[in-house]
Image (cartoon, rainbow, N blue to C red):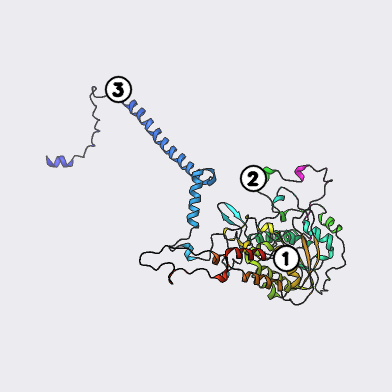
Amino acid sequence: MADEAAAEPAKPAEPVEPAVAPAAAEPAAAPEVNAASEAPLCSAKESEKGAEQTTGKVEETKKMVSPSASRSQGRKTRRDRRKKRSPQKTSGRRDKNPARSRRGRLPSGPANQPSNMVAGPIVRDGKAIYSYGNYDPYYKHRFDRCAEVDPRIQALLQFCGTDIFTDKVVLDVGCNSGFITFLVAALGARRVEGVDVDLSLITRALKHLRWLKQKGYKTMPEVPEEGTESDKPWHQEQYAVSCVQGRGHIPYHAKPLKAGALQKAMAMATKPEKAVPSIASTTPRPDFPYNIEFRAENFQLSQLELKRKTSYDVVLLLKITKWIHMMYGDVGIEELFAKCHELLRLGGLLILEAQGWHKYLEKKHQPPKRRGAHLNLMLRPDRFSELLGQLGFEKQTSMCPSCLPDAVVVFRKVTKTQAEVPMMKELFQEQQFLVPRALLKPPKVVPPRQGCPAASSPGAVPDVPEALGTSNQADEALGTSN
């Protein structure tokens, strides 16, 4: 029997039917209830995912919004900026690179002197402070579509003639963005060098210079003339306020001149008797704009011009004396004029536009540490002519058009070597013999402690010597000196 069972082939297993639940335990609508209950569960999960995505988008949008849009976010951002600006005692990025400054300045030079160059303004509490006078002087013309010849250049052409810049080597100290430098080069100068302490301004000037060379301009670009000025509508003369506020203004040096502006300025010029004689040169004069050079340097501290041994025919000092005077004092002004005397050749011209004393008293664009610098100045701007006369200059003419707040004075170098300056010696002598106010203050009386010597004993605070005098005598001395 066992052999027969082994020989028979194995039969396939019959399919087992699933067990059917009793009718009493099987609800009739159970599948429909389960299907209906799964649908709301899926929609709830999808809604949670959608809410998370929406929240993420909102957070990303908040990051892109300017901090000034909300007060809390703006305060938090300003607080973080202050923390970053504050000096860190622990080792960090500021310790690894101490030469980097938070005020936008480059590494400073000598110990007790201002930095050699700057890169833009100093930002304090959201306000820009141009402590070197490196602001845009043509900001009030930001709505104009075209530029005009600077009124100072027009006055120089009118009083000194067209030969003042023709075939001359010119140095523009404090050139800013270079508008006057471009004008002088277009008027026929052999070579024009623009120098400024601000790197950002020199960068803009070099960018415009490269653009002029790329486009192949032989003079400053001008707008083609279309009808008279009275026939032109306002939108052809000025930009809309909304356009300037929304997209920013075009720099004045990058705007084209009005049609025929240079020709009109040349036509108004005269030929005076004392013109600067030009030196005959064998080399041909370079064309515009290849006769322009821009440099970022502190003219007060730099020795590059002296090392080059270049003799200039004209040196421009336009609205630069106030900032040098406030930063370097009376000695800095004397060194500035002495350096100009050394750089100019015999018979060369120094064109000076000095700000009045009332400009020194303004607190605008003055850093907090320099707001009282004018109190230590003994030399006033109205005595600059006397100082230049003692240095070897002769006053030629003074022009003050109605459109200019300060006069433009032209000086000529008449002596080859510098003479002594007795005026500066007198100023320093007066300042030397004045009694300092700190010594005139009465001594602070401290009540003696128990076991300490009294005020009348030799160990007490000494009284002010009689040789120093009283405060009334010092005030009289200060009044007589002024």
What amino acid is at disc 1? Arg
- Write down the quadrant of residue 365 in the picture: bottom right
Q: Which mark is residue 383?
A: 1
For marks 3 and 1, give the CA distance: 113 Å
Return the disc, 1 or 2, that comes first in the chain's sequence. Answer: 2
Q: Earlier in the sequence, mark 3 or mark 2?
A: 3
Mark 2 sits on what residue?
A: 246
The label on residue 28 is 3
- Magenta portion: prevailing SS class: loop
- Above/below status of 205 relative to 69: below
Question: If you read the primary sequence from the N terminus, does the residue marked by circle 3 or circle 1 appear first?
Answer: 3
Q: Residues within 10 Å of mark 1 (few under 14, many from 20)?
A: few
Q: At which x and y percent is residue 388?
A: 74, 69
- Find residue 49 and report its horizontal and vertical position in percent: 42, 38
Secondary-structure class at tag 1? helix
The residue that appears at 72% across and 60% down in the rendered structure is 214
Image quadrant where one finds the C terminus:
bottom right
The residue lying toward the viewer, choosing from 188 and 290, is 188
Q: CA distance from mark 1 to mark 2?
A: 46 Å
Q: Are the two marked residues, 3 and 1, in contact with CB atoms closer than 8 angstroms?
A: no
Side of 373 where 75 appears, left or right: left
Residue range (magenta): 217-239
- The quadrant in which residue 179 appears is bottom right
Which residue type carries mark 3?
Ala
Q: Nearer the viewer, residue 416 or 450?
A: 450
| Residue 399, x across and y down, in percent | 80, 60
Q: Residue 384 lies in magenta, yes or no? A: no
Residue under the point 79% across and 59% down: 153
Instruction: Report the front residue among 291 and 455.
Output: 455
